[in-house]
Image: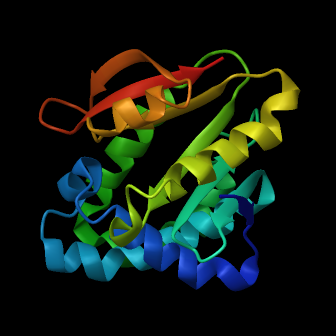
Amino acid sequence: MTARLATVTDRRTVAAMLSRAFADDPAMSWIIPNPATRARKLPSLFRLLYDEDAAHGVRLMTAGGEAATLWRSPGHAETPPSTMLRSALPMFATFGFALGRAFAVANAIDAHFPKHPFWYLHIAGCDPAHQGKGLGKAAVQAGIDRMGGSGLPFYLETATERNIGFYQGLGFRVIEEWRVGRDGPVFWSMLNG
């Protein structure tokens, strides 16, 4: 199984798939607790993130869009203030009054980035209907293979504990466990390299 570069025309397909993949994600569930609201709001969030990762990253997907990864290049893991300003209205349209929780998660993620240069696996997802077939692994491995020549490590964080073993199978190791605020989701930071 292989993955290819995702293009502008793949935007809706990838965003819809990521919405299904993150439907029960602990961080997304904390930000938008109502499952029906979350299902309605996530596609617009993932379209926005898909667009953001085009400028300074690599977007990969399996042939049928069953799995995808959005990577950010070294030095571009954090979202710049100019992008935050441009995204303010779409972000409010997505999160509404949950925007404070969304920013709390984003700020906590930024605070736990490694201090050295790294490739950031910003988002990885596989459609629940296709999990267990090796497609998610293919999408992540394609990024590792593509950027592996840089000699820089790969970094990610996950709020889904069952994902830890999946990423360990791809050479990542847990380097930190942390929580957003006092009652927010727990995350595991992982590094490969």
Protein image colouring = rainbow
Relative image position of residue 89 (x, y in whole percent): 48, 75
* Side (left or right) of 143 relative to 183: right
Check the image and report above or below for 125 versus 93: above
Q: Is residue 106 left or right of residue 4?
A: left
Q: Which percent across, then down, holds residue 10? A: 66, 80
What's the residue at 54%, 47% (across, down)?
137
Using residue 3 as the reference point, say whether residue 35 is left or right of it.
left
- Against 103, residue 130 (above or below) is below
Picture quarter containing residue 157? top left
- Towards the viewer: 160 or 100: 160
Q: Position of residue 108 (x, y in %)?
A: 39, 33
Q: Name which residue lies at 19% across and 52% down.
A: 30
**Any part of residue 89 in sight:** no
Task: Tell me the quarter of the picture where residue 189 sits.
Answer: top left
Q: Quadrant of the N terminus?
A: bottom right
Q: Which residue is located at x 59 percent, y 42 percent? A: 121
Quadrant containing the C terminus is: top right
Can you see residue 142? yes
Classify residue 182 by image quadrant. Answer: top left
- Vertical placement of residue 98 versus 179, above or below: below
How many circles with numbers are drawn on the protein?
0
Q: Residue most toward the right?
A: 149
Q: Residue at x 83, y 21 (%)?
A: 151
Relative to 178, does residue 135 appear above or below in the rendering?
A: below
Give how far across and how far down residue 49 sits, in percent: 57, 64
Frontmost residue, 161 versus 107 = 161
